[in-house]
Structures are given as C-alpha cells and as structure tokens.
Amino acid sequence: MSIEKTLFAAADKMWGTMDPGEYKHVALGLIFLRYVSEAFQRLHDRLSAEPHSDPEDRDEYLAENIFWVPEKARWSFLAKNAKASTIGVMIDDAMRAIEAENPSLKGALPKVYGKESVDRGMLSGLVDLFTNLKLTGAASDFDLIGRVYEYFITEFASAEGKRGGEFYTPKSVVDTLIEMLEPTHGRVYDPCCGTGGFFVQSERFIAAHQGQKQDIAIYGQERNHTTFGLARMNLAIRGIFADIQWNSEGTLLRDAFPDERFDFILANPPFNISDWSGDILREDARWKFGAPPVGNANFAWIQHIHAHLSQKGVAGVVMANGSMSSMSGGEGDIRRALVLGEAVDCMVALPGQLFYGTQIPACLWILARDKSNGIARNANLRDRRGEVLFIDARKMGALVPGSRKQKELSEGEVARIARAYHAWRGEAEAGDYADEPGFCKAATLAEIEKHNFVLTPGRYVGAGAAEEDDEAFDEKFERLLGVLREQFAEGRRLEAEIEARLGGLV
C-alpha cells in the first residue's frame, strides 16, 4: 500500500462521528503545518551549521521562498504537546501565528482545532500520525507531502460525493486540458479555481518539460472561502506563488481581474447554475456573443472566459454536455455566434463517471481568441479559421481500481486526445493530422451549420471501424447458448437457496 493510502486509511479510522466536510480541514491543515515546519526546520538546521549565519533571521527564509514559522508554531513543539488537553488551542494559535508572520497566508489557514466538536484523542492521534511520517530533508520529501495532500483532497471529494465534486476536478480531466493547452509560459487564470488543481498540474507540466515555474504568473478567483483557503495551502505546499482572490459575490458578479487578459485559462465552472444574478448582468460587456439566459450560467462562464483571453490566448473549459446542444433561453443563438465568431477551436466529449458524486456527462470547450495565429512551444500555429476540431472520447476511460463507479482516463488516452489537437493545430512535433472515424473530425463551418450549430462530437466523427470477428456464426451461437444455459442454471440455484433460507426463518 502506498504512503498516501496508508495515511488516509489510518486517518479514516479516526473520523468517528465527524463529517468528512469538517474533517478534511482538520487533516489537510495539519498536513500543511507539517510541511511548512519541515521546510523551515531544514533551512534552520543548515543555517545553524554555517558560520556567521543567523538561523532566526527572517530574511534568510524569505530569500528562499520559505515561510517563517514562529517557535510555538513549529511541529516539534506541537508534537511534544500532542497529548495535552489544550492541543487543539495550541494548533489554532500556531495557525494564527504563521498567518501573522506570512501576510500571503492571511485568512487561508483553518482554525478549527480548539472547537468542542473536535475530539482531542482524534487530534492527538493525527499529530502522532504525521509526526511518524519519515522525512529525510531532501526535496523529494516535499513532493511526497504534496502527493499526500492531493490524495487526501481526492479521497475527501469521493467521500463527500456531490459536494466534494464541486471543488475538485478529477486528475485525468485536469491532465487532458493541461496536455492540450500546454501552459508553459505567460499568464494563467482560473476564474473558479477550487483547490487549485489546475495550477498544480500546470507546475508539473513545466517540470516535465524542463520549464521554470517563474515563467508562469498565476491568477485565480474562488467564491467559497473555505475552498479558497485550501487552494492557497495547496499551492503553498508546492512553492507556487499566485494571486488568488476571494469575494462572496463570485466571479460573474464581481470579477477580481476585470481589466486583465490571460494567455491560458483553465476552468471547471459549476454546471447549470440558475442563481447567478443573470437578471442584474443582462447588459454586461462580456456578452459579446449574446446575453446568457437568466436561468443558466453556462454561457456566462464561457463568454467571461473568452473575454479574458489575450490576443493569442487559449482556454479550456469543463462544461455540462447540455451546453453543446441546448436551444433554450437563446443558448442555440449564442453557440451559433461563438462558432461563426471563430471563438471555438475544439470540442471534446468525455466519458461518463469521471466526476465525484455526479453522473452528469461533461465535455471540454477549447476556446481561442484568434484562430488565425497562436504559439505553442515557441512555434507558430496554422490558421484554423473556418474549422472546428471534434474529438469523441466517450468510449475511453476505465474504472479506477477498487471502484465500481468512478472512471479515469489513462495516460495513453490523454496523450491521444492531446496529440490529435496538436496535430490539427499544425504543431510539427505531433505529426500530420488526419480525421479518424469514430474519434476525431475537422469540420467546416458549413458542416456545423447543417447540424444547426449543435457541437456534439458524435454528430461529426461518425462511426469507427467495426471490430473484426473471425468466429463462425454456428460456433458463436453454440458458445453463447451455452453461456446462457449456465446463467439460467445459476439463477435457478440462487432462487432455490433464497427460498430455503427464507423457509428457515418461518
């Protein structure tokens, strides 16, 4: 069992009666505290061993992008007092002290440990649990903490069901958009950033391609204050510094970056939201392609995102499937305007069961500010005006090991989707593009108009080649008949066993 699973399994036993929604802040806050303490202690030890260095000089830590941790907020102090009756209050005080010393974390850390509802025994057990997490002081330690943090977020999303899915985008969906858009430089934005998953994956993409984190400037906005705190901790754990803003009104009503434009936008907005203040925003300048219906925010999000793209910017948006075909409230007219306005670069139909707690099928909208140009890996893209690429990935994906309902895309499937998009855009490294029946199709605007501007990929890609079947009909018939007889026999056996057991209860 991996270290992530081991830790979560141990923590799982400590849940007791605590709701997962409350427990995640307890566990993830402690993971964060353990991380920043370890990073601080590592540099503190190094400075202590160097002549003429002061291990208590805050500037030394600031210079290496390490958070300053006051003495009574350090993990060593808390671990020594893990069994104290006031451990919860001590941890809350530690969180406040770290925020006071590090303004970038102000308001981000949870202070829930001293509440009466938090069991002291459970809290002491968690402190011991994370204390026993063996670290060596190398950079790989902090990657491990990041992995544990991400795993916990994933598991909490699964445990919380729909509510958890609202703040967590499954990794394979994030990977797909990251691989398609390749955000290796410039300004990256997420208008509903959740726990910051898109930003974390962006950083990983850069590392995998020998880029530098400093090449990207990250911006985000989040309406849920608790999730906003999780995002800031999630980014801080990985040393990613970002301008993340919060307000209670939300992005559509109160845009934190109204005058900014971004090279890459990655977003998973809440699907089909009816209460989005659409009646107040009817005349908003962002609705270049038509005013969104008051009862559904989907096309408000799509247009908000497109409006924030830089001249060569590209965006990837996770949306409910209904956005590809709905005609209600003028959505069909908006979709038509988006296509004719050359705002839509690519549409991807995703398989079902990817998201936690909801079976609503989703798709990806890839938007471009100007399809006549663009840059990928310092190479110019071809002029794509007059075309939209459609990718049907509904048959992809497999059940996550140990799950009966949760699916994920494999690395190979993600690469296949991204490769088709890169080839169609004219990226030399991806090879020549060719339509693939049942999977991808570059459709002209005239073809899309014939479908009344419905953007469901299945309408365009056609059917794939039928699988070859060399088995003779007579042999197949006998084989399948034998299987059916076996199933009938098993059914009769189970029926008799059930009747016998029920009779024993009389």
Image: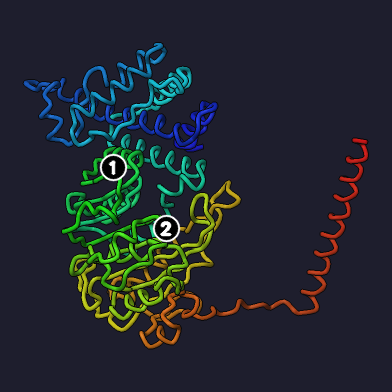
> Looking at this view, is 274 or 153 the one in front?
274
Query: In this rendering, is residue 91 above or below 221?
Result: above
Position of residue 356 in the picture relative to residue 494 (left or right) = left
Check disc 1: other Cα within 10 Å, few if <14, some if 14-19, many if 20+: some
**In the rendering, which numbered label is found on residue 235?**
1
Position of residue 249 in the picture relative to residue 58 (left or right) = right
The residue drawn where x is 26% and y is 59% is: 183
Which residue is labeled 2 in the image? Answer: 274
Dot 1 amino acid type: Leu
Q: Earlier in the sequence, mark 2 or mark 1?
A: 1
| Place of residue 481 in the rendered image (x, y in percent of width and height, measured from the top left) | 82, 69
Q: On the image, which quarter does residue 323 sit in? A: bottom left
| Place of residue 131 in the rendered image (x, y in percent of width and height, measured from the top left) | 38, 23
Residue reaching furthest to the left: 52
Check disc 2: other Cα within 10 Å, few if <14, some if 14-19, many if 20+: few
Residue 287 visible:
yes
Residue 143 visible:
no
Dot 2 amino acid type: Ser
